[in-house]
Each structure stands twice: as C-alpha cells, then as structure tokens.
Amino acid sequence: MHLGFVHKFIPALPRIPHPVTLLLLHGTGGDENNLVPLGNELWPGAALLSLRGKVLENGMPRFFRRFAEGVFDIEDLKFRAEELAQFIEAASKRYDFSTKKLIAVGYSNGANIAASLILLHPHHLAAAVLFRAMVPFEPDIIRDFSNLSVFIGAGARDPIVPGGQPQNWRRCSRAEAPP
C-alpha cells in the first residue's frame, strides 16, 4: 500500500521504549532510500518513514514544483504540503505511530516541504531537522512554534539558500513576532 507516496517504512527496533518516527524527505533527485542511513545515524532504532517526491523535474524526483532555482511555485508547494499532511495522517494509522513523536528530517527540497508543513500544520510534527531550508513562503497566519523544536542547518556561503534564511523563521512565529 503506497498511501499516495512511494515510500519505505522501517519499524522501530523492538528494544526501543516509546520510539519516535523519523519522516525522511530527500533533496532534488533523491528517493526513499537516500536518507535512511542518515536517519539510522541520527536516531538509532527509531522507526523510519521515508518518502519519494511525486514531482519530476528533468526526471529527478522533488516534493513540489519550482519556476527556477530558489523560486518556488507557491500554489503547488501549498497543495503538496496539504498532500503530505494527508499522507502523514493515513500513514500514522497504517503503521501505528503517533504524530506527537514524528520528527521530520529534510534536505534541501525535502527540508522546504517540511518547512511548509510546519507553517501550515505544525501539529503534525514533534520536531524537525532541516538541512539547507528556506522560509518557503510568508504564512497567512503567524503561529506559536514555542512547543516545536526545529534545527536548521545552513551555511553562510550556500550558493542557493540566501543568507539570513534561518533568522527569517523568527518572523513566522508568534513567539518572536513584534507586539
């Protein structure tokens, strides 16, 4: 059963009490296998739910369309984030995991779809680890992310992600919004 996405689910090791599930989201050109080794390194024994993006760009899987490098098709991005939220709901029932223990791990395009999910549905995740993420769009609603732990890995000299992107996340959170 693919629940709308080609994916791989690896159950948590039986000896792990109260296991978390890592939602693994690859970068452009990756697939459901790419981040499995990273997931095993980040949290040995955790359940792994690894997806393949459904959008193809020059034959390479992605999670949403873009017009150019760093220029996102926002309408498609929001649609795909909603699609991901529906997948998470179905997968949590199918594989019997709690979204209260779901941690998104995304790289580049995968980090940006996870970021979109955070902006639209922060209740679907317990935490996120985002490598090379951008603020994908300005949210219509400023939410309180004080209960959501997010690690953003970004480089000061990244040629694709503009400088200051990690700091831009503060504008999207009620906890950091001006009074």
Image: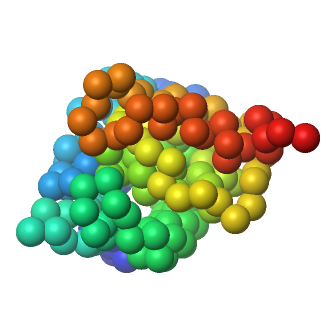
Q: Is residue 27 left or right of residue 103?
A: left
Please state the horizontal and vertical placement of residue 136, each as a whole percent of the image.
Answer: 48, 55
Position of the N terminus by quadrant: bottom left
Q: Quadrant of residue 133?
A: top left
Determine the residue positioned at 67% across, 47% down.
172
Q: Quadrant of residue 12?
A: top left
Viewer-proximal residue, 63 or 43?
Answer: 63
Please state the horizontal and vertical placement of residue 16, each as a whole percent of the image.
Answer: 50, 28
Residue extending furthest toward the right: 179
Viewer-proximal residue, 123 or 119?
Answer: 119
Q: Is residue 47 left or right of residue 176?
A: left
Determine the residue positioned at 64% across, 60% down.
139
**How is the protein colored in the picture?**
rainbow
Please state the horizontal and vertical placement of residue 2, each as a whole percent of the image.
Answer: 33, 73
Q: Is residue 74 left or right of residue 96?
A: left
Determine the residue positioned at 25% across, 56% down.
69
Viewer-proximal residue, 84 or 63?
Answer: 63
Please state the horizontal and vertical placement of residue 75, each as a whole percent of the image.
Answer: 47, 76
Does the image show residue 154?
A: yes
Tell me: residue 93, above or below residue 37.
below
Task: Count the marks.
Answer: 0
Viewer-proximal residue, 3 or 179?
Answer: 179
Does the image show residue 45?
A: no
Position of the C terminus by quadrant: top right
Q: Is residue 30 left or right of residue 92?
A: left
